[in-house]
Image (cartoon, grey):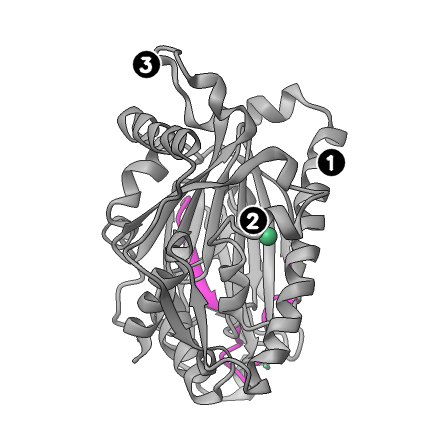
């Protein structure tokens, strides 16, 4: 994040503290409750957002060496990402071209030379080429060049790996330039310099909530005082945050209690990470949170209209990892995980209550404008 933006955000939040105001939008905003459970809408979201948009499925630190691989099933598509001996990262459908079994069953691994199907032993090299058909002469004529693993578009940048989960035709290019998709966020992601960061941990949570309701829990600070008094609220000022819409994505910052220490300090020394957490919503389903020493990555995936799986991953710069003991990182992960249990406990009641007939729409306050923006953006993409 550029220094000028850091100072602007910090100044805005200091002004809110001084004047007891909030980062107001022009008025209330709304989204219909059916959007959270209607099966037709749900299917459109899966078909459009989770098949046509780039989705974060892995991190560079999981795939640094030739033969490293990651399997990812959360989009509903069976995805296999691997790095070849040529250093190129590739993504495939994890589907054998004989009769469709998964060619890799482990969630991740290293030193792979070939993917061998467990069913009849067909084998594929790291570039996805079909290299072996067991008992091939007797099997009959198969054009191996046309039966490689089905490729997917993939991009690796800023320590993140995006895949577009739609099978490519043999003549289509698997390259994906992520920068135009990120738009204004590109400069920020480049600035955080995450390429060398290590994945500390990644764990799934399966709330009985629509996948968008999971994202909603990140988009306002209003609830911190009431829902998180014993976990994350003590770290933050009460509902002091500033939001910005950047194309289909968003960036915002949430002020920590130390913010007011900046009053009177020279602005060239202001560093936003010392006094706020910086958030990004990468459309459609990822939230990044930058704290002083790490990045939390939250990805929400649809299972059914009323169920999702959220992966909570922590990326850490190697120099920070070396400085701090494992107990420090574990305490951090535990704190956020406990707050998520609080969020999702409430979220599951909301999901149930959508069908009660009490509310036809969700009402978002002026300082909850990011929720309004997010649901507008999803609606525009699927309607
Ligand atoms: S399904 Fe893979 S070898 Fe038969
Ligand atoms: Fe929360």
> Residue at 44% across / 18% down in the picture?
262
> Residue at 33% across / 37% down in the picture?
188
**How many residues crowd mark 1 within 10 Å: few (<14), some (14–19), many (20+)?**
few
Residue tagged 2: 68
Left or right: 348 as drawn, with respect to 183 = right
Which of the image's four quarters has the N terminus?
Answer: top left
**Above or below, 175 relative to 190:** below
Residue 331: give its label.
1
Q: Are marks 3 and 2 in contact (CB under 8 Å)?
A: no
Q: Earlier in the sequence, mark 2 or mark 1?
A: 2
Residue 91 highlighted magenta (yes or no): yes
The dominant secondary structure in magenta is: loop
Between the C-alphas of marks 3 and 2, the distance is 42 Å
Residue tagged 3: 268
Between the C-alphas of marks 2 and 1, the distance is 29 Å
* SS for callout 1: helix
Between the C-alphas of marks 3 and 1, the distance is 32 Å
Query: What range of the chain is rendered magenta?
Result: 87-107
* SS for callout 3: helix
Is residue 128 shown to the viewer in this render? Answer: no
Q: Earlier in the sequence, mark 3 or mark 1?
A: 3
Residue 66 highlighted magenta (yes or no): no
């Amino acid at each position: 994040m550029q220094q000028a933006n850091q100072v602007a955000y910090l100044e805005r939040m200091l002004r809110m503290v001084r004047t007891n105001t909030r980062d107001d939008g022009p008025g209330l905003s709304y989204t219909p409750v059916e959007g959270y459970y209607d099966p037709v809408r749900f299917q459109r979201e899966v078909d459009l957002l989770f098949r046509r948009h780039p989705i974060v499925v892995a991190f560079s630190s999981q795939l640094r060496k030739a033969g490293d691989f990651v399997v990812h099933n959360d989009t509903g598509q069976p995805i296999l990402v691997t790095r070849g001996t040529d250093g190129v990262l590739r993504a495939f459908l994890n589907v054998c071209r004989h009769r469709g079994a998964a060619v890799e069953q482990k969630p991740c691994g290293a030193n792979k030379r070939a993917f061998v199907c467990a069913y009849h032993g067909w084998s594929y090299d790291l570039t996805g080429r079909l290299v072996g058909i067991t008992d091939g002469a007797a099997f009959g004529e198969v054009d191996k060049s046309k039966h490689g693993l089905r490729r997917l578009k993939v991009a690796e940048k800023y320590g993140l790996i995006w895949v577009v989960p739609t099978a490519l035709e043999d003549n289509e290019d698997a390259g994906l330039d992520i920068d135009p998709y990120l738009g204004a966020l590109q400069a920020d992601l480049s600035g955080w310099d995450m390429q060398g960061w290590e994945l500390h941990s990644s764990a799934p949570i399966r709330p009985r909530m629509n996948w968008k309701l999971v994202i909603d829990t990140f988009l306002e600070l209003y609830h911190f005082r009431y829902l998180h008094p014993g976990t994350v609220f003590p770290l933050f000022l009460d509902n002091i945050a500033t939001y910005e819409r950047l194309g289909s994505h968003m960036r915002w910052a949430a002020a920590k209690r130390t913010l007011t220490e900046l009053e009177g300090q020279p602005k060239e020394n202001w560093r936003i990470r010392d006094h706020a957490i910086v958030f990004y919503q990468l459309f459609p389903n990822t939230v990044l949170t930058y704290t002083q020493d790490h990045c939390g990555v939250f990805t929400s995936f649809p299972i059914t209209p009323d169920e999702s799986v959220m992966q909570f991953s922590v990326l850490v710069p190697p120099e920070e990892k070396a400085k701090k003991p494992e107990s420090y990182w574990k305490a951090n992960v535990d704190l956020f995980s406990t707050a998520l249990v609080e969020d999702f406990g409430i979220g599951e009641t909301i999901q149930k209550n959508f069908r009660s007939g009490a509310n036809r729409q969700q009402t978002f306050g002026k300082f909850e404008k990011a929720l309004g923006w997010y649901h507008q953006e999803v609606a525009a993409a699927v309607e």
